[in-house]
Image: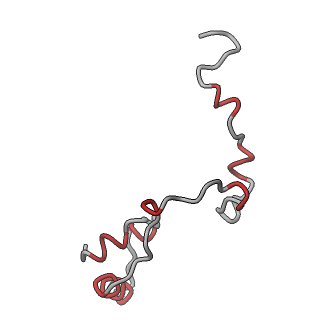
Amino acid sequence: AMAGKSKHPNLIEGPGLDHFIENISTGRVPREKRGEPKPDWLKMKIPSGEKYSSLKKSLRGLNLSTVCEEAKCPNIGECWTGGT
């Protein structure tokens, strides 16, 4: 390796640790640092539907939670609406 030069200049020029921890209490990125809005195809719809509601109600009645819920999986609506 070449002394003093990195193969990955973004590691030096990129954001520092402070960038990642400055909003750790909220877990949110300040509006001015969010950049461009996400494209529509990347946005997930809020889970809903009869099967979704029924499955959630059944789990709550049994005092259970799922890995999907705990991990805040963005695809939970697709799976639960399908009944899985």
Using the image, determine if residue 80 lies above or below residue 8.
Answer: below
Question: Compared to 18, does 78 lie above or below?
Answer: below
In the displayed structure, 33 sits above or below 83; it is: above
Q: Nearer the viewer, residue 31 or 59?
A: 31
Between 63 and 7, which is closer to the camera in this rendering? 7
Residue in the picture at 68% in, 36% down: 14
Where does residue 56 sit, x and y in percent of width and height? Answer: 36, 83
**Residue at (40, 77) in percent of width and height:** 47
Quadrant the C terminus occupies: bottom left
Relative horizontal placement of residue 49, taking residue 4 as reference (left or right): left
User: Horizontal and vertical percent for residue 60?
Assistant: 39, 86
Q: Quadrant of residue 36?
A: bottom right
Q: Quadrant of the N terminus?
A: top right
Residue lying at 32% horizontally and 70% vertically, measured from the top left: 78
Q: Quadrant of residue 11?
A: top right
Q: As rendered, which of 54 and 30 lies closer to the eye?
A: 30
Q: Report x, y in % for residue 32.
A: 73, 58
Depth check: give the residue in front, 35 or 64: 35
- On the image, the x and y values in percent for residue 12 come to 69, 29
